[in-house]
Amino acid sequence: MYNIDPKVLKNIEVSEKITINDAVIRAIADAIAHPSWKMHASGLKDAFTEVSKYSNLRVLLAFTAVAEGCPYCVALKKEVFDTTAFGWWAWNNGMILANIDFDCFPGAPSCNPPPADVAAYNQYKGNGFPTVIIFNSKGTECGRYVGYNPGTGVTAYTTQLGVKANLHVSGGPCNRGW
């Protein structure tokens, strides 16, 4: 893991339209340094609250079951989420990353995930593992990608995710207008 001092990134101008502030610096450092972005649903509210302050940011919410051993989730984490290329893609697309990883499949015998995680999975209509959903700064769902084909890789996956979420459709709900 890289240790990036957010002070180094302070006042870097990304474009003529935005200057990076402290909150965005933390998000960028998180994306580049690639610490675990696993959280419980309680942290999800903070991610949406932060994104709502900036019209050019989005939330990428991933429901996974890596801890359960879901082979598609494990492959997605290894081949996509744990790569520097994904960190840069997330940064370039203004993503705040949120991953709720289940250590058992909800509904399975003796499975007791945190109730808030199950509620978030149901609220955002999780449809199996992995389910990746992108939201704009207003909390509107832009698109989702369910499943992962091992071997797809970061470039193909992020391209498909971008198409499903209409990231670059002019005037679309997830277009940042750049």
Image (spheres, rainbow, N blue to C red):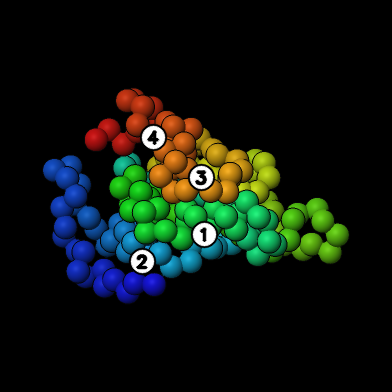
Residue drawn at point x = 77 percent, y = 63 percent: 112
Q: Which mark is residue 33?
A: 2
Disc 1/disc 3 C-alpha distance (Å): 11 Å
Within 10 angstroms of label 3, few (less than 14), some, or many (20 or more) residues? some
Q: Which mark is residue 78?
A: 1
Sequence order check: which comes first, mark 1 or mark 3? 1
Q: Which mark is residue 167?
A: 4
Helix, strand or loop at label 2? It is: helix
Q: Residue type at mark 2: give it.
A: Ala
Q: Residue type at mark 3: give it.
A: Thr
Percent from the top left, x then y, of residue 165? 46, 34
**Above or below, 71 relative to 35:** above
Q: Quadrant of residue 73?
A: bottom right
Q: Residue type at mark 1: give it.
A: Lys
Sequence order check: which comes first, mark 1 or mark 4? 1
Sequence order check: which comes first, mark 2 or mark 3? 2
Disc nearest the viewer among 1 and 4: 1
